[in-house]
Amino acid sequence: MLNTKSIFSFTLLVAMVLANAVNAQDRLNVVQTAVPFLMVSPDARSGSIGDAGVSSTPDENSMHWNPAKYAFIDKEMGVAVNYSPWLHKLVPDINLAYLTGYMRLDKNQTIAASLRYFSLGNIQFTNAFGQPIGDYKPNEFTLDGTYSRKFTKTLSGAVAARFIHSNLTLGQQVGSQSTKPGNTAAADVSVYQQLPLELNGMDAMFAWGANISNIGAKISYSNDNIVKDFIPTNLRIGPSLTLDFDEYNRMSFMVDFNKLLVPTTPLYSDSNTIIRGMDPDVSVPLGMLHSFYDAPDGFKEELREVSISAGLEYWYNKQFALRGGFFYEDATKGDRKYFTLGAGLRYNVFGLDFSYLIPMKQENPLENTLRFSLLLNFDAVTGGGGKK
């Protein structure tokens, strides 16, 4: 039998080591990429458990967190609509919308697709003299598709393909450089495993997942294609434990560890030569490989590049949920630290999730913002089975 206590003790130890490593005061060196909207939590459920989700129980929004979870989803078909206002205290028209749906092919195979749309609102462009030249609505979107399959009764895997479109300047002249929308393609590779347990007479489920997302070509916004930027290729890995106290009460605990698999900016001298670190102008495969050992301050800085998400979720009668979580990022790598809260409802065809973010230190674009998700279970319409 799997020793769950040992597994979670080890997980806690790793989290403590990472937290101690990131407490060191050092120079600011944020890992930067293009199209960062790909890393924003798109749904209210995961948004309320500290942005964790690589090993949480499968749901309609598994595409973003771990597509391999779809193979274990216990419904035949479902759709989710998600909406997140962005910087709503400053502007009313910036938002992230996320539409996703899945369909089970048989007991082992599931397909899914999603559309992510990020609107930057209405922006007035000006020329070099500050004179208005027009109002525009920059936007970014992705189209995704995935195939998920069970390899065994407990293990599944998935591959996903993604088209990325980023139109930030709408063809405007920036300085002496003409611009264009950025387009690229990417892929995800993921695994997920569920292991049934019995703990102190209770039914339980230990799960773990791993997802390498946004493995794709660099993106360019200039017509000459000389300057190209990495997209946020990311490694997400972590465990979860679900406990069924009785037929009405269920509690889940989960932890995610995230690391961007893109080069870290080296330390340059005044003559623009590299003092410490590695040349970031490399191919995507080399960039992913170098991301594990290219930080200028060595291994301690590599540890600081790991962000930690932790959350818990309580379900009553598989109809009402309460959630909470915490997200930690080192001060030298962005300094995002926040608590999250949320709730969920499931009734017949419909499901609703809500989340709320409380920042600890710096302001957050989602501060004091209520995000929501609407989920539709078509099993209830067709008379199919399935349970949360």
Image: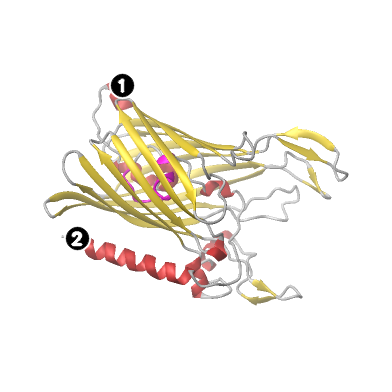
Q: Residues within 10 Å of mark 1 (few under 14, many from 20)?
A: few
Image vertical order of residue 223 relative to residue 60, above or below? below
Q: Is residue 10 visible?
A: yes
Image vertical order of residue 385 relative to residue 17, above or below? above
Q: Quadrant of residue 208?
A: bottom left
Q: Is residue 104 visible?
A: no
Nearest the camera: 270 or 247?
Answer: 247
Residue plotted at (73% across, 55% down) = 226
Q: Is residue 53 magenta?
A: yes
Q: Secondary structure at mark 1?
A: helix
What's the amino acid at mark 2?
Leu
Q: Secondary structure at mark 2?
A: loop
* Dots 2, 1 in contact, CB < 8 A: no
2 or 1: tag closer to the N-terminus: 2
From the image, tell me which residue sits under label 1.
381
Q: Quadrant of residue 149?
A: top left
Q: Residues within 10 Å of mark 2 (few under 14, many from 20)?
A: few
From the image, tell me which residue sits under label 2.
2
Q: x, y percentage for residue 385?
A: 23, 29
Q: Residue farthest to the right?
A: 129
Instruction: State the separation of the CA atoms marked 2 and 1.
Output: 39 Å
What's the amino acid at mark 1?
Val
* Left or right side of 206 for 180: right
Type of secondary structure dominating the magenta stretch: loop
Which mark, residue 49? none
Residue plotted at (54% across, 47% down) = 38
Nearest the camera: 267 or 108?
Answer: 267
Nearest the camera: 155 or 363?
Answer: 363
Residue range corresponding to the magenta coloring: 44-58
